[in-house]
Amino acid sequence: MVAADSEGPKDPGIGMFRRERSIPLQGSAAALCNNLSVLQLPTRNLTHFGVVHGPSTQLLSAAPEGVPLAQRQLHAEQGAGVSPPLITQVHWCILPFRVLLVLTSHQGIQIYESDGSVMVYWHALHFGDPSPVHAVFARGIAASGHFICVGTWSGRVLVFDIPAKGPNIVLCEELAGHHTPITDIATEPAQGQDCVADVVTADDSGLLCVWRSGPEFKLLTSIPGFGVPCPSVQLWQGIIAAGYGNGQVHLYEASTGTLHIQINAHARAICALDLAPEVGKLLSAAEDTFVHIWKLSRSPESGNIEVEHCHGECVPDTQVCGARFCDPSGNSFAVTGYDLAEILRFRSV
């Protein structure tokens, strides 16, 4: 294992970013990890942004110059409770034949058409008789093939089979590997290979479970936690990037669970990771007000995982709660913060 600290780039010309025009919000982002979802629509030259605020989600569309073109608010479905349920996450899921928008809350899981215009599926969470010290909620959303995986407070991961069109969505499986609430789920296309780890689930104890998706999901390996939550996880070319509550980012081999690199990336808890799949850039954001960008690669000789720090951006006086790349090459990214009534945007110079 190699330890790495967050230092500036060796070449000052690597990955410099400048602030772009920000996008105004009607209210600030809620203080939740992974509180930003981004969907790029290159054919229409648009980018969609989704941000959670209490019982509602703001959806915004913006052209490259940052002018907001459309806004929509979605609300959590009212269940048996008296007060409106709080939304825990919003995320666009890109499936082979369609794009769907998924909201999770303390009441259930809502699946919409990509623009939020039509709700195609609603799954109520089964309360049963939960322990009074545990809140009931869903959190952690990712698409794998024609499945959408959603995590729950119980540690179960619900797997929904999504048809090519229409509302005939089926809960086909519940994955059992965790005993504490799911925090995040990461996937990447397996491209038809057998025994390929293409789904990673993370929980509040820091435990990671690595799965192979399919008609029946198979647990390949578990990576033990160490008493620190793992709020965000990403998967790229067989590399698991996990961000922890102590500010560290760990890079694991997905197939074996072996820890290769431990990065002392932040001074406080990490709240979001994202990956630019075309180039292997990793974005990490934390409560220390910093967003860092790293370059992941493998040594051509040994195949070992390597990492290089490319850029650090401070968002002063802001509790960062969401950060995402806005394009698959990692040339632009966006940041949300608690008590910040705008989405900050940055683009490479």
Image (spheres, rainbow, N blue to C red):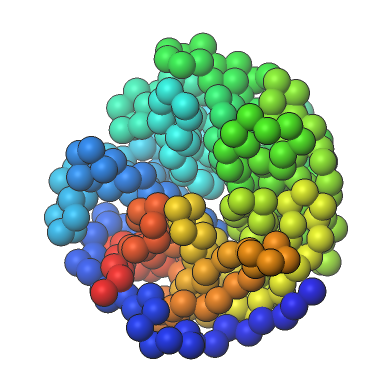
Q: Where is residue 175, by image quadrant?
A: top right
In the displayed structure, does residue 54 sit left or right of residue 202?
A: left
In the displayed structure, does residue 226 sit left or right of residue 100?
A: right
In the displayed structure, does residue 324 sit left or right of residue 282?
A: left
In the displayed structure, does residue 335 sit left or right of residue 209?
A: left
- Please report the residue visible at 68 percent of the width from the left and 33 percent of the height from the top: 193
How many marks can you see? 0
Q: Position of residue 296 (x, y in %)?
A: 57, 66
- Please report the residue visible at 60 percent of the width from the left and 16 percent of the height from the top: 170
Q: Where is residue 195, by image quadrant?
A: top right
Q: Can I make out residue 218 in this image?
A: yes
- Please report the residue visible at 66 percent of the width from the left and 81 percent of the height from the top: 4
Asked if 294 appears above or below 38 in the picture, the reply is below
Give the residue furthest to the front.
301
Q: Nearer the viewer, residue 80 or 338?
A: 338
- Please report the residue visible at 63 percent of the width from the left and 84 percent of the height from the top: 5
Q: Nearer the viewer, residue 245 or 328?
A: 328
Q: Position of residue 125 (x, y in %)?
A: 64, 30
Q: Position of residue 295 (x, y in %)?
A: 52, 69
Locate the N terminus and report the quarter of the image it occupies. bottom right
Q: Nearer the viewer, residue 69 or 312?
A: 312
Asked if 346 appears above or below 141 in the picture, the reply is below
